[in-house]
Image: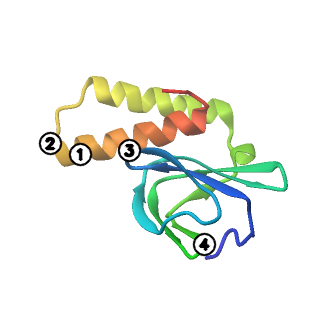
């Protein structure tokens, strides 16, 4: 499903090694995306989405984002998002699984923090 197809001035995304920005003429690259906020600016107006992670490709003045989930922050029920965050934090307190399970729980935690509006 194509969610957004726009000519924009700048794209900012949550990369695996930290947030990155892309302007016209940027060098080509591919990177993994982490759960977080995807933003773009067009004509001085910023638009925001929350993504669950994915892959970004920058090539020939185009940015392609592949993600399993894209949410408009305005559609998130803040109280439910905070309850979800609290449940994940409680799950972390009692965690006794393996490394892969911990990494998945940490990914869920990062997404819940963004959805609840909590800065790390």
Q: Position of residue 95 (x, y in %)?
A: 23, 31
Q: Position of residue 36 (x, y in %)?
A: 52, 45
Above or below, comparing residue 65 to residue 102 in the picture: below
Q: Are marks 4 and 3 in contact (CB under 8 Å)?
A: no
Q: Label 1: how many residues lie within 10 Å, few (<14), some (14-19) or many (20+)?
A: few
Residue identified by numbered label 2:
98
Q: Are marks 2 and 3 in contact (CB under 8 Å)?
A: no
Residue identified by numbered label 3:
107
Above or below, comparing residue 86 to residue 49 in the picture: above
Q: Earlier in the sequence, mark 4 or mark 3?
A: 4
Q: For the residue labelled by badge 4, is the local secondary structure a helix, a strand or a loop?
A: strand
1 vs 3, front mark: 3
Q: Position of residue 90 (x, y in %)?
A: 36, 25
Residue identified by numbered label 1:
101
Q: Are marks 1 and 2 in contact (CB under 8 Å)?
A: yes
Q: Label 4: how many residues lie within 10 Å, few (<14), some (14-19) or many (20+)?
A: some
């Amino acid at each position: 499903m194509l969610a957004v197809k726009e000519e924009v001035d700048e794209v900012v995304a949550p990369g695996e090694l930290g947030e990155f920005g892309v302007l016209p003429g940027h060098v080509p690259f591919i990177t993994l995306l982490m759960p977080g906020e995807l933003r773009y600016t067009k004509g001085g107006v910023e638009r925001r989405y929350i993504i669950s992670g994915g892959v970004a490709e920058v090539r020939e003045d185009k940015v392609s984002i592949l993600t399993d989930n894209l949410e408009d922050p305005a559609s998130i029920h803040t109280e439910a998002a905070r309850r979800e965050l609290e449940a994940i934090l409680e799950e972390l307190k009692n965690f006794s699984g393996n490394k892969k399970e911990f990494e998945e729980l940490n990914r869920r935690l990062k997404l819940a923090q963004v959805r609840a509006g909590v800065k790390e």
